[in-house]
Image (spheres, rainbow, N blue to C red):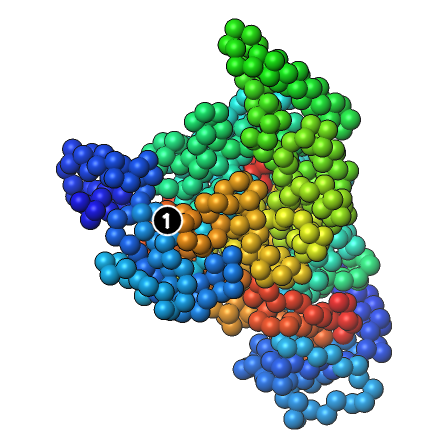
């Protein structure tokens, strides 16, 4: 039975099986292993590689064992390998955790509905195409977990969704955080500065923008009071309001705010609002972090930043520095990188860490900044972001040093299943690009954003 | 046109010579990539009066005591960006600093790059700090003919200081990448028809210009006539395979010298490109796979190189963030995707110089050439390597 389950769950050999038999096996496997249907019954062992667990020093000639979707052992060459394991000799390679991207626009989702300036009720998961080729771009770059967000054109453009990039037919197959009770699948996207300012329902000035946000959060506080006063009595509950319900989740710390912000004064405004209402905040982009790193550190909020090959392109990014990572690290801020795909390319996410090191970050913190730091920002650090026993089997196999331009991602594994393999010609095309590989799935914030 | 070129060039040369008369520099490198022969271990580049005086191994060269000495792990010729819009496109990306595309008319060959170039633009300094010493810049993609391009050094307070060549190419764009500001063309075939009509007019104009009874001057027609006479080249930005074939058809009908630019789908028509032999300023390796370039491949530079087609790298045009790319980084990704490190360095320097026909002045470390040098603390293409020094016309600028 276990071997048959493997056949189903790895998604590779299904086509040779009769559909009805597949179904029966799948049901059996779910019964055997629970709802996590991505488990594998034969342990998979990887030997000979340098393992960068992130949670500790790199291990030369290390061993990684994954079983039933989880990491069951990480260690040196003397680590016990189960007798029935499939052993993969990956000598000369480097293994590190699957990458975590805290800010991406892959999946062809929309969001940022111009009918109003604030849509905390809008869920990007209701718009994503789980078959989008853009997910392959992320897999080719070694990204296994991602926060897909609506854009920055509104003060509150909607709810984000945290995804594992499993092979999927439905968005439900990809959900990373499933809070059945509260229906919370991600964070909340907010923005300040010039992007959410403009005509129509949007604010024309910074102070008005902050006032509009405060007003809605004050309403949410009042709403929460009514809910608390009802004390579980359905008859006393206020009428359901999806916008305020979402903000109550934010007020209760169940949902993290991801706040697009660039300029130093806007960064501090985002911090000020988070302190007034007591919500958890991840600053996003933070182009002028270098000006207010100590203030960010003192506030105890985290920073998800981007690296760019040049400053400018918009006034708010005119003073962005690639040393933001180093300066935030020195200040003691939890700092991570994001792709903002298609602003930077998911296929080259590791490059962000290299740019960080080139501009003064420590190697350790730069690698954390594409893995565990981001997992912490998404509250998934108990499941992914390091190679530790008990965590999900999310890892990547690299041809060499993760910070070298010559290194390629060779394999991407999620929950013990190989989901991308550069040795496979069809998969490889997603790394290099080519004819009809990416038929128009790029998201940029600006028409004509590429040549 | 040639007269203008000379008038600008002479003072530029005098100025650059004047400003660097005291500069006597020795650059020592653990590895010196001269691009004129094998790399030299423990090499020395002697610089005098803005020019390279001598290049050789440390054992063969005595450094005069009055020379300022710089040392680096790796020394290369100054890098060349073979197509950019920096200086016309500014970093703020607001109306006041965007001069790379004039949208009043889709065909404006009379627009000169030097009339818009801001030598103090921060993006020019950004490229300079990455070891890029020469840039082919000017009017950008987005119009059938957007205007002229020029070649500058990434230094100088004025365009005159910076100029290497005032009138290098005419920037064409084919395909679906035209600005939506134009009322026409709305289709590919109309675009080609408009270009053909204009070039036929230019043929007539040229014939009259060469006659005893020349026509009254038309500066747009002058530029196209110069193109037809081969004094300047067409730089045709084009990505889709069928549009590339249209460019070739147009070139064959009118016989002008052509450089292809972008060429995302080159790999679909390698035989045709190889046979035609046009040099290619290949799209940035990291170009976003969207629009006409949606089928771009990171392996294209390597494939073109292997086919023996002359190529160079470009920073291209960026409409948003980041506002410019950096050819050093584009070369790195090309190297990692089939081109190889030493070939990529060659493409970044001497090959680009040859493509732009400025290899008599730049592109390699050889006696008599401009003293443009880049210094690195490791493999120039590696992510972690830093540019440790830049010399332009014998002057240390970083």
Helix, strand, or loop for circle 1?
A: strand
Q: Quadrant of the C terminus of chain A?
A: top right
Seen in the picture, residue A406 relative to A417 is either above or below; the reply is below
Q: How many discs mark residues in the rendered view?
A: 1
Q: Is residue A372 visible?
A: yes
Residue B111, position as x, y percentages in the image = 70, 46
- Picture residue at 77% right of the left edge, 55% below the top: B119
Seen in the picture, residue A107 relative to A405 is either above or below; the reply is above
Residue B13, position as x, y percentages in the image = 78, 69
Q: Chain of mark 1?
A: A
Residue B321 sits in which quadrant? Answer: top right
Residue A279, position as x, y percentages in the image = 65, 31
Residue A45 sits in which quadrant? Answer: bottom left
Q: Quadrant of the N terminus of chain A?
A: top left
Seen in the picture, residue B322 relative to B1 is either above or below; the reply is above
Q: Is residue B123 visible?
A: no
- Picture residue at 54% right of the left edge, 28% below the top: A159
Label 1: how many residues lie within 10 Å, few (<14), some (14-19) or many (20+)?
A: many
- Picture residue at 41% right of the left edge, 59% below the top: A74
Q: Residue furthest top?
A: A235
Seen in the picture, residue A182 relative to B135 is either above or below; the reply is above
Question: In the image, B7: left or right of A28?
Answer: right
Question: In the image, A82: left or right of A342?
Answer: left
| Residue tagged 1 | A70
Closer to us: A126 or B270: A126
Closer to us: A105 or B49: A105
Closer to us: A403 or A430: A403
Closer to us: A233 or A420: A233
- Picture residue at 60% right of the left edge, 72% below the top: B378
Residue B214, position as x, y percentages in the image = 69, 50
């Amino acid at each position: 039975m276990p071997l048959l389950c493997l056949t189903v769950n790895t998604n590779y050999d299904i086509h040779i099986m009769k559909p009805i038999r597949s179904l029966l096996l799948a049901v059996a496997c779910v019964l055997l292993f629970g709802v996590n249907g991505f488990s594998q019954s034969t342990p998979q062992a990887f030997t000979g590689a340098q393992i960068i667990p992130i949670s500790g020093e790199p291990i030369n000639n290390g061993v990684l064992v994954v079983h039933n979707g989880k990491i069951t052992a990480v260690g040196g060459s003397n680590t016990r390998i189960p007798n029935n394991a499939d052993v993969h000799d990956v000598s000369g390679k480097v293994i590190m955790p699957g990458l975590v991207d805290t800010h991406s626009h892959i999946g062809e989702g929309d969001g940022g509905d111009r009918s109003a300036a604030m849509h905390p009720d809008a869920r990007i998961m209701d718009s994503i195409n789980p078959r989008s080729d853009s997910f392959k771009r992320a897999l080719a770059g070694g990204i296994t977990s991602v926060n897909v967000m609506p854009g920055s054109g509104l003060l509150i453009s909607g709810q984000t969704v945290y995804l594992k990039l499993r092979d999927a037919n439905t968005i439900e197959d990809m959900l990373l955080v499933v809070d059945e009770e509260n229906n919370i699948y991600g964070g909340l996207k907010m923005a300040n500065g010039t992007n959410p300012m403009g005509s129509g329902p949007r604010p024309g000035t910074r102070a008005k923008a902050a006032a509009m946000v405060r007003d809605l959060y004050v309403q949410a506080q009042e709403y929460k009071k009514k809910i608390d006063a009802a004390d579980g009595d359905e008859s006393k509950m206020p009428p359901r309001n999806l916008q305020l319900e979402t903000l109550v989740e934010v007020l209760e710390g169940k949902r993290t705010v991801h706040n697009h912000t660039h300029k130093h004064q806007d960064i501090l405004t985002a911090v000020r609002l988070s302190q007034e209402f007591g919500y958890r905040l991840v600053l996003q982009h933070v182009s002028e972090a270098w000006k207010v790193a100590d203030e960010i550190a003192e506030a105890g909020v985290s920073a998800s930043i981007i690296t760019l090959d040049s400053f400018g392109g918009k006034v708010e990014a005119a003073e962005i520095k690639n040393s933001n990572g180093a300066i935030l690290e020195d200040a003691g801020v939890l700092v991570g990188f994001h792709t903002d795909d298609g602003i930077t390319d998911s296929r080259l996410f590791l490059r962000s860490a290299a740019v960080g090191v080139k501009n003064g970050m420590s190697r350790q913190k730069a690698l954390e900044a594409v893995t565990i730091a981001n997992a912490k920002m998404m509250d998934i650090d108990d499941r992914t972001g390091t190679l530790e026993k008990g965590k999900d089997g999310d890892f990547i196999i690299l041809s060499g040093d993760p910070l070298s331009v010559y290194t390629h991602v060779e394999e991407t594994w999620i929950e013990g299943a190989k989901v991308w393999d550069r040795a496979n010609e069809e998969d490889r095309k997603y790394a290099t690009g080519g004819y009809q590989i990416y038929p128009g799935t790029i998201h940029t914030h600006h028409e004509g954003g590429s040549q | 046109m040639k007269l203008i070129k000379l008038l600008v060039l002479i003072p530029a040369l005098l100025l650059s010579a004047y400003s660097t008369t005291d500069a006597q520099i020795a650059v020592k490198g653990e590895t010196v990539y001269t691009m004129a022969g094998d790399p030299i271990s423990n090499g020395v580049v002697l610089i005098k009066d803005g020019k390279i005086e001598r290049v050789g191994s440390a054992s063969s060269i005595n450094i005069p005591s009055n020379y300022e000495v710089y040392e680096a792990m790796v020394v290369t010729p100054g890098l060349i960006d073979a197509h950019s819009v920096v200086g016309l496109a500014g970093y703020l990306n607001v109306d006041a600093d965007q001069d790379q595309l004039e949208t009043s008319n889709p065909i404006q060959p009379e627009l000169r790059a030097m009339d818009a170039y801001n030598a103090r633009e921060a993006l020019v300094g950004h490229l300079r700090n990455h070891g890029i010493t020469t840039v082919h810049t000017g009017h950008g993609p987005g119009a059938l003919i957007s205007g002229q391009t020029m070649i500058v050094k990434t230094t100088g307070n004025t365009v005159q200081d910076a100029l290497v060549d005032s009138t290098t190419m005419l920037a064409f764009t084919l395909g679906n990448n035209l600005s939506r500001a134009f009322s026409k063309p709305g289709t590919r075939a109309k675009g080609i028809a408009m270009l053909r009509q204009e070039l036929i007019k230019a043929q007539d104009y040229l014939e009259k210009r060469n006659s005893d009874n020349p026509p009254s001057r038309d500066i747009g027609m002058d530029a196209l006539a110069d193109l037809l006479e081969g004094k300047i080249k067409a730089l045709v930005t084009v990505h889709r395979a069928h549009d590339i074939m249209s460019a070739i058809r147009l070139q064959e009908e009118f016989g002008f010298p052509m450089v292809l630019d972008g060429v995302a789908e080159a790999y679909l028509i390698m035989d045709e490109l190889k046979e035609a032999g046009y040099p290619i300023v290949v799209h940035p390796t990291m170009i976003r796979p969207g629009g006409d370039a949606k089928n771009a491949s990171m392996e294209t530079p390597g494939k073109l190189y292997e086919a023996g087609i002359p190529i160079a790298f470009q920073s291209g045009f960026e409409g948003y963030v980041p506002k410019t790319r950096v050819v050093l980084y584009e070369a790195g990704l090309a190297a990692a995707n089939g081109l190889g490190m030493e070939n990529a360095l060659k493409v970044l320097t001497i090959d680009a110089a040859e493509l732009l026909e400025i290899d008599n002045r730049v592109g390699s470390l050889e006696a008599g050439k401009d003293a443009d040098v880049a210094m690195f603390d490791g493999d120039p293409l590696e992510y972690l390597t830093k540019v440790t020094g830049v010399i332009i016309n014998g002057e240390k600028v970083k």
